[in-house]
Image (cartoon, grey):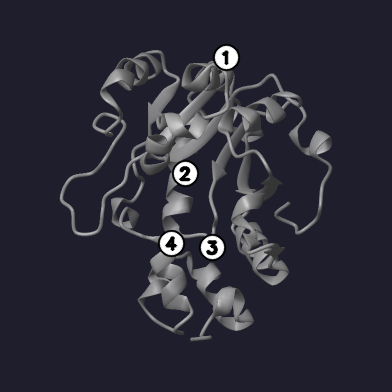
Amino acid sequence: SPAGEVVVPGELLYRKPMLVIRGTFKPVTCVNIDMMLGGQKQFSQESAVDESEILSLAEITMNSLVSGDNIDGADFLARIDLLASQGYTVMISDYVRFFRLRAYLRRYTQKPIGIVLSVRDLEVLFDEKYYEGLEGGILEAFGKLFPDNTHVYVYPSRRHGAAEMVTLDNVPVPAHLRHLLTHLTENGKLVAIEPQDAGHLEIDSAETLAGLRRGHGPWENDVPAGVAQRIIERRLLGFDSE
């Protein structure tokens, strides 16, 4: 929780509308915050959502915590600490596929569930290789992701130096799946998010991490001020180690 406590899922999630953003958050950047703000703005417009009840979750999957065969405890705790400092409740899961995450959350609430994604992740969502081993493939997965009161909010992206944004409207997906994208968009299952601050679009967390490991530098503008301060003061995530 934001207070740094471990909480029982049932108590925390029970009967709440939930908005989830998945990431590595290494570190949490301004673009993560902007994604969540944009998602909250859209999610709160759902008729069954009371804005004051929304539970914002930052989800980290176990596979993003493993380095080799081990989990780096200090790295793991640093990411949680930085997210909590920004008011997020952190959820650690081993649900690689989004529909399994939705099914887990649905155990605790019948209220709407929102999942916030970068348009880059949407490309993965429409990659059929992602569903190998699933009998019904991508159609089964989407059927399980969107059966009820669940929406995916898609945040745009802009490659460094590129003029045009990639959005829900122009994201490249395989031609034979375009109709599926159109269907989900027209039925309000996939919803575009407007950036609250387009200046954050080009932030690349891998570059931010590489920068902070070299010490003070421009990376400090990529993260909220309180996050930069914590990283520097506590020498988190390998700050100034290279």
- Judging by the rendered image, the residue that carries numbered circle 2 is 37
In whole angstroms, how far apart are the C-alphas of marks 1 and 3? 32 Å
SS under mark 1: loop
8 with respect to 134 (left or right): right
SS under mark 3: loop
Which quadrant of the figure has residue 193?
top left
Determine the residue positioned at 64% across, 33% down: 101
Q: Earlier in the sequence, mark 3 or mark 4?
A: 3
State the mark number for residue 26. 3
Vertical order, 67 against 181 (above or below): below
The outermost residue toward the left is 163
- Judging by the rendered image, the residue that carries numbered circle 4 is 205
As shown in the figure, which amino acid type bears the numbered disc 4?
A: Ser
Q: Are marks 3 and 2 in contact (CB under 8 Å)?
A: no
As shown in the figure, which amino acid type bears the numbered disc 1?
A: Pro
Query: Camera-side residue: 100 or 106?
Result: 100
x then y, percent, for residue 178: 29, 20
Determine the residue positioned at 40% across, 32% down: 127
Q: Earlier in the sequence, mark 3 or mark 2?
A: 3
x then y, percent, for residue 9: 79, 38
As shown in the figure, which amino acid type bears the numbered disc 2?
A: Leu
State the mark number for residue 147. 1
SS under mark 4: helix
Vertical order, 161 against 16 (above or below): below
Please name which of the two marks, 3 or 2, marks the residue nearer to the observer. 3
In whole angstroms, how far apart are the C-alphas of marks 1 and 2? 25 Å
Q: Earlier in the sequence, mark 1 or mark 4?
A: 1
Query: Camera-side residue: 209 or 112?
Result: 209
